[in-house]
């Protein structure tokens, strides 16, 4: 997900040698059966992420506007609707070291765990990246226990129609996602791309559940740890992406939240910089030394005024392109509350606004792609934009 070149032939061997040493303590339980459903990313990648359609339409947690997020129902629908990439998934660990796909480690809002009396005593309060959070956490469950749960709609007030599918799908593992990717690639006759995110890597490393080595080991097992592999890896923590840069050759992306925020790894290490510093030319040059792209919030591309209306675009797109980074901002959603005020229609929280007008405004800035909960809408908007 970027324009910087990397000599895979010379750098890959060194990184994978380092990976071999890094994962020795990760534990065999991290991996399920590799199976025979293995696609060679270098062979099927079609030249890599730079050859994906532009602007690239990325199914945010699948087609989460229509199905509960991070389920195979959501992922499958994103492909059926034509998404160029599927964000499968947000990766968090289990107690026994597996990686599962959940928006957050706290699963009270995305599963039916509260309906399971056998897990009532697992409810607890933890400090998650400095925020007191109460609920049930994946790291307190084994994979077998999590597999007894079912996914539910996270924002039912905005998506009451999605509640129809509550309880239909279980929590997927990343190993299952990688096998699903290969199966779908074969069935569809073209490479399926995924875009996993490492969630709270500093938090989990302190618990003895480091994410980077587990992700790298799975990618290596499926031969998807190369620059041409159809897997783009992202994180809000720059040091996590730097760590990945040393052990895999995949395209890497640094996610960027609001301008005044600080990545949690910066907080932990005493780095005083904020996102506002990272989006300056010097910060972008530093990111470009270990990543191929950035995933900024849309407000970093086009700020909103006090009334929530779009204002003048920043120079972020031009500044990032100048150092060879691509931009995949987040997140486009059709529903009113998520749109800039000048594109909302009516007061209803689940009603659609003028999302095509909003897409046009954002595409006009030159962004390389966008995360969207409704991939079909994004594809139509791209058709309109490209004329």
Image (cartoon, helix red, strand yellow):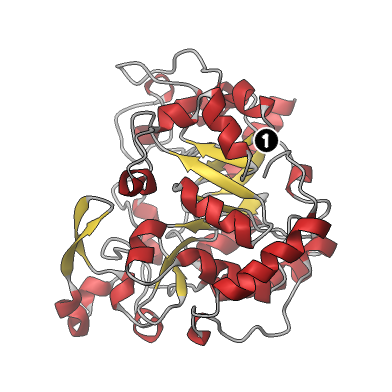
Number of numbered discs on residues: 1
Q: Say which residue appears at 24% left-offset and 69% top-offset.
A: 136
Q: Say which residue appears at 36% left-offset and 79% top-offset.
A: 146
- Percent position of residue 275, x then y: 42, 32
In the rendered image, which quarter contains the C terminus? top right
Q: Is residue 85 visible?
A: yes
Q: On the image, which quarter does residue 343 sit in?
A: top left
Q: Say which residue appears at 49% left-offset and 12% top-offset.
A: 312
- Percent position of residue 12, x then y: 75, 61
Tell me if mark 1 has few (under 14), some (14-19) or many (20+) residues whose alpha carbon lies within 10 angstroms of its own: many
In the rendered image, which quarter contains the N terminus? top right
Q: On the image, which quarter does residue 175 sit in?
A: bottom right
- Percent position of residue 244, x then y: 57, 57
- Comparing 9 with 354, the one in front is 9
Q: Is residue 218 visible?
A: no
Q: Say which residue appears at 42% left-offset and 60% top-offset.
A: 68
Give the residue at mark 1: 55
Q: Is residue 47 above or below residue 282?
A: below
- Percent position of residue 227, x then y: 74, 55
Q: Is residue 33 left or right of residue 224?
A: left
Q: Is residue 154 left or right of residue 97?
A: left
């Amino acid at each position: 997900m970027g324009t910087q070149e990397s000599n895979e032939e010379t750098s890959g061997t060194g990184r994978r040698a380092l990976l071999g040493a890094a994962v020795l303590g990760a534990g065999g339980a991290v991996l399920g059966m590799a199976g025979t459903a293995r696609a060679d990313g270098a062979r099927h990648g079609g030249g890599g992420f730079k050859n994906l359609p532009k602007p690239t339409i990325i199914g945010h947690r699948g087609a989460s506007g229509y199905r509960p997020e991070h389920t195979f129902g959501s992922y499958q629908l994103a492909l059926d609707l034509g998404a160029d990439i599927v964000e499968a998934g947000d990766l968090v660990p289990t107690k026994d070291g597996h990686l599962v796909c959940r928006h957050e480690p706290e699963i009270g809002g995305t599963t039916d765990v509260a309906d399971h009396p056998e897990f009532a005593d697992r409810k607890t309060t933890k400090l998650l990246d400095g925020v007191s959070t109460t609920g049930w956490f994946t790291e307190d469950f084994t994979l077998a226990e999590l597999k007894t749960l079912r996914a539910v709609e996270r924002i039912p007030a905005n998506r009451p129609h999605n509640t129809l599918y509550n309880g239909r799908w279980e929590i997927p593992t990343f190993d299952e996602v990688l096998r699903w990717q290969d199966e779908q690639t074969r069935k569809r006759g073209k490479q399926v791309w995924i875009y996993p995110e490492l969630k709270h890597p500093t938090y989990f490393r302190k618990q003895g559940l480091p994410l980077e080595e587990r992700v790298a080991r799975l990618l290596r097992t499926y031969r998807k740890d190369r620059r041409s592999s159809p897997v783009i890896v992202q994180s809000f923590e720059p040091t996590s992406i730097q760590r990945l840069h040393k052990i895999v050759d995949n395209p890497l992306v640094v996610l960027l939240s609001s301008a005044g925020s600080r990545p949690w790894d910066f907080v932990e290490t005493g780095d005083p910089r904020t996102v506002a510093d990272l989006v300056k030319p010097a910060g972008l040059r530093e990111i470009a030394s270990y990543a191929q792209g950035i995933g900024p919030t849309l407000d970093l591309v086009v700020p909103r005024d006090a009334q929530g209306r779009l204002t003048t675009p920043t120079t972020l797109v031009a500044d990032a392109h100048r150092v060879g980074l691509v931009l995949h901002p987040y997140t486009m959603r059709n529903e009113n509350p998520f749109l800039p005020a000048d594109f909302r229609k009516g007061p209803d929280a689940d009603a659609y606004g003028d999302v095509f007008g909003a897409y046009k405004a954002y595409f006009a800035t030159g962004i390389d792609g966008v995360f969207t909960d409704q991939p079909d809408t994004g594809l139509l908007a791209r058709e309109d934009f490209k004329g």
